[in-house]
């Protein structure tokens, strides 16, 4: 991949990838200065405001498994982050979670008003598919990416998960219901990040076991990510989080900590981490996968779970 | 095309196409009965609640120009209507136009609540791109359709037009500004309907003049549609319209009637109708276009403008 020495450590790699992504997103997103300025401003504010860029990182890392085309990978990574960004804008609105702080700044509807926030979210979603459609890449690959992203974002993925989440507030869901909701609400897009990275390369050369391994890795990682978020939500303060701390508890939202307890949640994060690594072994065993191609995916699993300890 | 005798009159053709479309939409959209039921219910309520189906009709009619694959055409038509449907759901919400009646029924947020309405709109947009990605058709065609739809829906199309519309309320825009706003807000998707119909067939065999003619037809028709809507909004009552009559005036929204007067607006509708037909002559002149292939597009122009007289 561009600008990458296989020997750099994870932190350096992740930092370089995130910087590269920021540059690509900044220069590819609708530029400010042309009407409707308020809308392009809100779209850029929503996406270019930092964030961990975990989805782009997963996409870049998974691309190594199939020798992905770097330019297509950039577009897949941006499309994922545009969808993620739009979902945060809409989820933060008063009709949904009614949150006023995100990444240490006022949320989009606080900054730009509700109407513009709604439109910015809508336009970000369109832009995600436009970014894919503009790729100079084999059309079959582009169609696969569009389908993977659309399903992950839609009624049986992220939007459906958010609907289940809303239905759960104030209720007392069990582990299975919480798992189901989260594997849709956040897990579907994490899964798409890994799949789209791999689908930007020689996906057709991967065997079923390797494909299944990538999906299992992503599923475990997505859930681990959520468990860790719940742990952080109740152990860190608002300044460290960059968003309102303790909000889930205040909103009477079920979390992994409320169901498993803090120690139970930590143990669960650890076991999901181990599951993710076991799944990667299936990927590495595929003869079409180059040696050490799963290294960055392994490191991302360490990084995600390591945040909670 | 399926189920079609070229000799049937426009009304019969349009009725058959609309019925076929209803069947395709009903059976292809997310089915009810599986969780999240409230969300799938709201999505189906938004799209399957009738409507003039002008975008699908345009898509089917334009498909005749390039001998489009009927199955791909169904998907293009549905994708367009899903985007149109989502935009109505979001535009009707309190943060935007705050309308409570649509197609003679309560709007989606009135029926299902604001959170579900927002999610239903979001999921309908994802579903539009999913419907295209699932097509069994040459991948190059599918990518072209995705790109056309995404651009029409996004910041330089429908969403951007809605942003300009919001910025205009209470102001006194001139003809040029109103034209610019509407050519984005509603015109972009009308244009996409015609282009996507033609792009579902042998688009690559059309010459530049024919492509330009289709675009010019769509542009004139889209604007005519809006002029006619403004005429109807101030001449018909709520029961006939199926939505709140006189709302634009009450909301202090600029319309073609407020700018040109009622007679001026009628004259404008007539001249746009003539423009649309002149543009179709350019299409019909292309040697790749079969004889009488533009007949349905001609009839749609008569139909759209005829509503106002």
Image (cartoon, coloured by chain):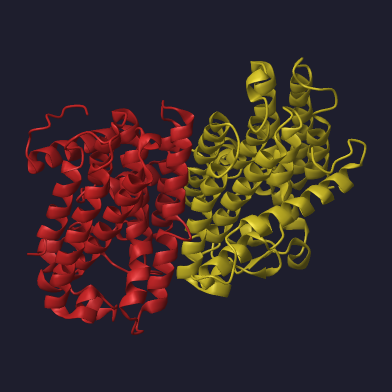
Chain colours: A red, B yellow
Compared with A156, A201 (above or below) is above
The mark total stands at 0
**Where residue A85 sits in the image (x, y, percent)?**
32, 51
Whether residue B298 can be seen here: yes
Judging depth in this view, the residue of A218 and A80 nearest the camera is: A218
Whether residue A30 can be seen here: no
Asked which quadrant contains residue B115, the reply is bottom left
**Where residue A295 sits in the image (x, y, percent)?**
16, 42
Q: Residue at x 57, y 60 (%)?
A: B30
Image quadrant holding the N terminus of chain B, namely top right
Q: Residue at x 60, y 44 (%)?
A: B186
Judging depth in this view, the residue of B25 and A282 nearest the camera is: A282
Compared with A71, A57 (above or below) is below
In the picture, measured across the screen, residue A281 lies left or right of residue B121, that is left
Compared with B182, B62 (above or below) is above
In the picture, measured across the screen, residue B304 lies left or right of residue A269, that is right
Judging depth in this view, the residue of B264 and A94 nearest the camera is: A94
**Where residue B25 sits in the image (x, y, percent)?**
67, 55
Q: Residue at x 69, y 23 (%)?
A: B213
**Where residue B34 sits in the image (x, y, percent)?**
53, 70
Judging depth in this view, the residue of A128 and B51 nearest the camera is: A128
In the picture, measured across the screen, residue B26 lies left or right of residue A158, that is right
Q: Residue at x 40, y 73 (%)?
A: A166
In the picture, measured across the screen, residue A59 lies left or right of residue B275, that is left
């Amino acid at each position: 991949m561009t600008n990458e020495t296989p020997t750099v450590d994870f932190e350096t790699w992740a930092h370089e990838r995130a910087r590269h992504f920021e540059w690509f997103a900044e220069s590819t997103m609708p530029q400010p200065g042309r009407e409707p300025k308020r809308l392009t401003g809100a779209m850029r504010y929503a996406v270019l405001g930092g964030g961990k860029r975990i989805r782009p990182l997963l996409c870049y890392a998974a691309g190594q498994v199939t020798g992905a085309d770097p330019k297509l990978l950039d577009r897949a990574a941006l499309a994922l982050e545009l969808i993620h960004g739009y979902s945060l804008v809409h989820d933060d609105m008063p009709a949904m979670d009614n949150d006023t702080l995100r990444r240490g700044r006022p949320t989009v509807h606080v900054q730009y008003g509700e109407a513009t926030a709604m439109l910015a979210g809508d336009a970000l979603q369109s832009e995600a598919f436009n970014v894919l459609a503009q790729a100079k890449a084999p059309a079959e690959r582009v169609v696969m990416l569009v389908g993977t992203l659309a399903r992950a974002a839609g009624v049986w993925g992220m939007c459906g998960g958010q609907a289940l989440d809303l239905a759960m507030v104030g209720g007392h869901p069990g582990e299975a219901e919480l798992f189901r909701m989260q594997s849709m609400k956040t897990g579907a897009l994490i899964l798409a990040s890994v799949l789209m990275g791999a689908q930007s390369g020689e996906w057709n050369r991967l065997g079923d076991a390797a494909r299944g391994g990538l999906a299992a890795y992503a599923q475990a990682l997505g859930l681990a990510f959520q468990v860790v978020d719940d742990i952080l939500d109740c152990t860190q303060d608002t300044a460290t989080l960059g968003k309102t701390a303790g909000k889930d508890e205040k909103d009477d939202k079920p979390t992994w900590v409320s169901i498993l307890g803090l120690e139970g949640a930590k143990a669960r994060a650890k076991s999901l981490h181990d599951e993710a690594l076991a799944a990667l072994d299936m990927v590495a065993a595929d003869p079409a996968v180059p040696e050490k191609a799963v290294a960055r995916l392994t490191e991302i699993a360490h990084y995600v779970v390591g945040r909670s300890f």
